Image (tube, grey):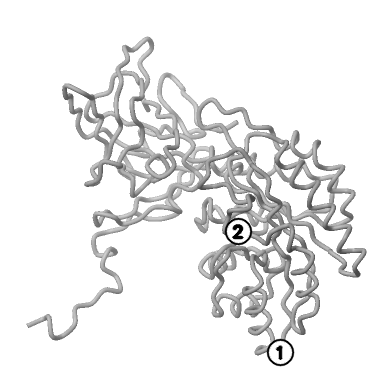
Amino acid sequence: MHHFHYHNDSLFCEDIPLERIAKEQGTPCYIYSHATLTRHFQAYDQAFASVPHIIAFAMKANSNLAVLRLMSSLGSGADIVSGGELFRALKAGIPPNKIVFAGVGKSHEEIKYALESDILFFNVESSAELQAINEVAMGMGMHARVALRVNPDIDPHTHPYISTGMKKSKFGIGADRALEEFQKAASLSNIQVVGLHAHIGSQLTKISPFVDSLTKVLGLLHTLKGKGIPIQYLNIGGGLGITYSDETPPHPKDLAEAITPLLRESECEIILEPGRVIVGNAGILLTRVLYIKDTDAKKFAIVDAAMNDLIRPSLYDAHHDILPVHQVPNAPEDVYDVVGPICESGDFLAQNRTMPLVKAGDLLAVMSAGAYAFTMASNYNSRPRVPEILVKEGESFVVRKRESYEDLILGEQIPEFLKS
C-alpha cells in the first residue's frame, strides 16, 4: 500500500495535490511519501519481531539524507557499498553498530574509514578482500569484524542484471570453497569472524528462493560451529520485490512465516537488508509533457524527465506505471512512447504504452520511483539533477534542491595554458 491516491480526479501524495508541488517546485522532481516510508519499514520490521534482528536498510536503493534520517528514527541501520554511503549514513545519524559494509571492491581507504567508524562488520566477498582487510586492520592495530558472503548458487528468478547468487556472479564466495575461506579467515591475526552472509538478488517475487538459499546456508552454519568457528550474525540480505505492474510479490509477513523456523534454528542474530520493498512504491517521478509528436510509425509523448533522471526503463527494460495527475473519467486512450529530451534512442520511460490521451502541458506521475531512481541519476547531456521532495501529511519539504547550471561545473577548472 502507498499514499498516492486520486481525490476529485486529482492525484495526491498524502494530503497534497501533485499539481501544487509542480507549481511550487517545477518539473521534473521526485516526491516521497513519509507515511508510506514509515508504513513499509514497520511492516518489514514487525514481520520479523519474533527473532532477534537488525534491519540494515539498503542505501543503494535511496540514499537521500532525509530518507535515511527517517529510517534511523524508526530504528534502522544501513547496508552500505561505498565510503560515500558510509559518510551519508553517519551524517543521517545511523548508529555505526548497525552498519554493514558490502561490495566486491572496497578500497584500502574505505576499509580504514569503516574501521575508524567502528561499523558492525564487513561483508567479505573474496579471499583477496579478506587479506586486504586484515592488512589494513593490522596497520591500524585493530581487529576487523567480518561476515563472509557465500554464493549459494540459487536461481532467484529475477532480471539477470540483479541476480547475485548464481555461480557466474561476481558476488560472494562459492559454496564449495566457503568452509576453506572461513577457516582461512579465522586464522588471520587481525580478523574476527562474526557472521555469515547470503544475498541472492533483487526484485524477488517468490518465497522459494529465500527458503532454498537459507537451507543451504544453515548446512554450512552447522559445519562451521562443528569446526569451532562460532557465528554470531546470520545476514540473509534483502531482495523482496514490489509491484511495478502485475507482479504479486509476497508480503514481508509471508516471507517471515516461511523462513522464521529456519532463522530460529540458526541461533544467530539476524541481519536483514531490505531496500526496494521499503522505498520503491513510496516515491514517484513527476514530469510534464513538452510536446506530442505524431509520426507514421509512432506517437511520442515527449516529457521533461529523461533517462538521466530515471534509467531503469532504459537499463532493465523495467516497467513503471505512468498516471495522469489530472484524470478524466472515461477518457479516450492512445498508444505512446513516453520519451525524454536526451540525445539517445534509449531515452524512454515507457514504450508502446496505452494511456489516456495526453497533450502538451499535462502532468504525469511515473510510479514506483522511490528505489534505484534518483540514486542512479546522472548529469548526462549536462542536465542538472532534479529536486527531491518529502511529503508529510499536508506539508512538503525540499530534501534535495534542484541543481543549477553552476552546480554542473563545480570542481572543474581550465588549465592556465588554455586560458590564453
Q: CA distance from mark 1 to mark 2?
A: 29 Å
Number of residues whose C-alpha sits closer than 10 Å to that of mark 2, classed few (under 14), some (14–19) or many (20 or more): many
The residue furthest front is 176
Kindly check if marks 1 and 2 are in contact, taking CB atoms under 8 A apart as contact: no
In the rendered view, tell whether residue 235 sits above or below residue 367: below
Residue position marked by numbered label 2 in the rendering: 171
**Residue 52, image x and y in percent?**
83, 53
Residue 265 badge: none
Q: How many marks?
A: 2
In the rendered view, tell whether residue 25 sits above or below residue 207: below
Q: State left or right for residue 272 relative to residue 365.
A: right
- The first of marks 1 and 2 along the sequence is 1
**Residue 347, image x and y in percent?**
30, 42
The residue furthest left is 420
The C terminus, quarter of image: bottom left
In front here: 23 or 93? Answer: 93
Q: Residue at x 74, y 46 (%)?
A: 213
Residue 141 badge: 1
In front here: 310 or 328? Answer: 310
Q: Residue at x 65, y 78 (%)?
A: 133
Number of residues whose C-alpha sits closer than 10 Å to that of mark 1, classed few (under 14), some (14–19) or many (20 or more): few
Which amino acid is tagged 2? Phe
In the rendered view, tell whether residue 51 sits above or below residue 186: above
Which amino acid is tagged 1? Gly
Q: Quadrant of residue 150?
A: bottom right
In front here: 226 or 389? Answer: 226
Q: Residue at x 76, y 81 (%)?
A: 188
In the rendered view, tell whether residue 155 sits above or below residue 118: above
Q: Residue at x 27, y 40 (%)?
A: 340
Q: Quadrant of residue 250?
A: top right
1 vs 2, front mark: 2
